[in-house]
Image (cartoon, helix red, strand yellow):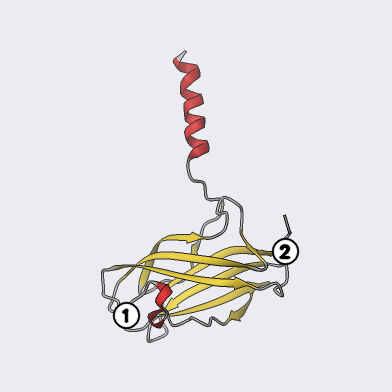
Amino acid sequence: MCRIIAPILLLCCLSFSPCRAFDVEDCGSKVGKFETVSLSCDMSKSVCDLVQGTNATITVDFTIEKDVTQVKAVVHGIVMDMPIPFPLSNANACQTPDSGIKCPLTKGATYRYQNTLQVMKSYPKVSVTVKWQLVDENDENIICMLIPAKVRYHFAK
């Protein structure tokens, strides 16, 4: 009886454990290290679906290895190996109340950064790698992340 129940319990546990089909890749973090990344998409899929006409939110917990006075977000969409700048209206994390960042940042501390982007209806349906960087006052990467994504059309329910 135990030989039958044990595999069933194992399968149940595995099916209810959090599953992440894609990983957020480090692309050259220097001053810090990201610990956890949470996205407002279904992270069990192979890519992060960015649905036109909705908002996409990123939340990152990271540690920092030196004192930093300024934090700026720099975002690019990489399509066919070509980085396309994505201007942020709230790029200065220190001056954006919703970012969760209060400058200066202290060496050895852990911080939580958050940002929400609008996925415009005018964006083309395309596969893209989102390169999201937080840079310091010397334009040195605090953290750098690559996120596989796809812009999808919004379908009415």
Under circle 2, the secondary element is loop
Q: Residue drawn 54% across and 81% down?
A: 88
Which residue is labeled 2 in the image?
Answer: 153
Packing grade of label 1 (10 A; few <14, some 14-19, many >=20) is: some
The mark that comes first in sequence, 2 or 1, is: 1
Q: CA distance from mark 2 to mark 1?
A: 38 Å
Image position of 137 with respect to 152: above or below:
below
Image position of 123 with respect to 127: above or below:
below
Residue 142 appears anywhere in the view: no
Percent of width and height locating residue 110 = 31, 66
Percent of width and height locating residue 47 = 61, 58
Q: Residue drawn 48% across and 45% down?
A: 18
Q: Residue drawn 60% across and 52% down?
A: 45
Q: Residue drawn 59% across and 81% down?
A: 85
Contact between labelled residues 1 and 2, with CB atoms less than 8 Å apart: no
Percent of width and height locating residue 24 = 50, 61
Q: Which quadrant of the figure contains the C terminus? A: bottom right
Which residue is labeled 1 in the image?
Answer: 103
Q: Amino acid at mark 1?
A: Cys
- Answer with left or right where residue 11 lies relative to residue 151: left
